Image (spheres, rainbow, N blue to C red):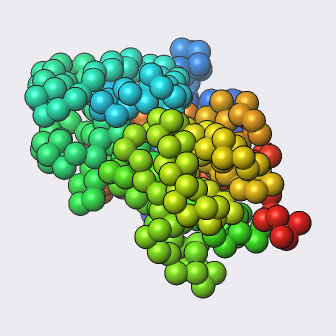
Amino acid sequence: MADAAIPNKRGKKSRRVRLEDIAEKVGVSLSTVSRALTGEKGVRDDIRQRILEAAKDANYPMPAPVPGKKIMIAASSAAMIDYVRNQFTLHVLEGARDRAKMLGLDIITRPIADASDERSVLDEAGSDPDVTGLLFLTVDDERMLAATRAFDKPVVLINGDDPHMRLSSVTPCNRSAAQLATDRLLDLGHRRILFLMRPGRRTIERRQEGFWDALRHRGITPTPDMTVTVDDWLPELATQAITDRIAANGLDFTAILTAGDSLAAGAMMAVQQAGYSVPDDVSVMGMDDLPQAAFLNPPLSTVHIPMREIGMTSVDLLRDLCSGVPALSRRIELACHVVERRSVSAPAGMR
């Protein structure tokens, strides 16, 4: 929260009131003051009242209360499929629920498979005065985004973004995350790297762009044959795609970067079934850092995506937008990092 300037006896502004000043006056910690002023739980009622009175006496600008008591999460069919197969959606939702609970808000989840489902969700959220705003999880469909932009309550996209920047969003830094992973492979000496992906979502396309960025930075021109695509995130489809590639071209690559850990698991199986070793013959790097990645054989090197933090940050952003203070739409991207395990090493000729 911003500090507040207070007038001196002549009516002129003097030094600005800080949260630290209120904390010192009341005799509590800075975090307690912050929680009390933002309405979070975990502060005794008598202490909260003393903090509010001290802030009022100091003319500290108080945040507007958030209307409503509930947040609605509209989850796309892609998000629900992921919820069943993997844990990405699960961890994002856990983070959102934990943060909402801390703020005293309830979360309602609704599935949306098409425009009619979306209309039903918008009608329900719009007519319920306790619903403060909407979180749309893994939504890319332009028709859905167009309808949501006209909704009269705040909306935040989770794991997706609005290309027109009319809606705020929270995502991992997909492009730089893929560039980090590719840089790691390049640093080890790999030059013949495949990128295995399921196309169709902007977030995944940004991962492909990060792959290209890293190659170009090292003077390598990306070519179409460096990208292998599948129709779904199923490991068996990745296994088939890499098996077909080896059958057609032999082992014309030394590393594979995949757009998701499930595809990495399938790619590893294809390499091993063809009689090669991971990482001695082919290095494999995933993206997501799902819990099962550590239990593959060998354990998968991957890029950690801050799933829980994505959910938590989305709730915080929605709460900010509900405060009544005019604000521009914003796109928040959270940092990612490479997790080193044993599926990646230098190419055979460079060890």
In the displayed structure, does residue 141 sit left or right of residue 10? left
Quarter of the image that includes the C terminus? bottom right
Q: In this view, does 326 lie above or below 23?
A: below
Query: Relative to the observer, which residue lies in front, 278 or 341?
Result: 278
Residue 227 at x, y percent in the picture: 47, 62
In the displayed structure, does residue 242 sit left or right of residue 323? right
Q: In this view, does 262 lie above or below 73?
A: below
Residue 148 at x, y percent in the picture: 18, 41
| Residue 313 visible to the viewer | no
Query: Relative to the observer, which residue lies in front, 283 or 63?
Result: 283
Residue farthest to the right?
351
Q: In which quarter of the image is residue 68?
A: top left
- Identify which residue is drawn at 67% across, 36% down: 293
Please give the count of numbered marks on the rendered protein.
0
Query: Relative to the observer, which residue lies in front, 22 or 308?
Result: 308
- Identify which residue is drawn at 54% across, 50% down: 242
Q: Is residue 161 above or below residue 319?
A: below
- Identify which residue is drawn at 71% across, 34% down: 296
Residue 138 at x, y percent in the picture: 35, 39
In the displayed structure, does residue 32 sit left or right of residue 76? right
- Identify which residue is drawn at 78% across, 65% down: 347
| Residue 282 visible to the viewer | yes
Residue 22 at x, y percent in the picture: 60, 39
Residue farthest to the top?
45
Residue farthest to the bottom?
219
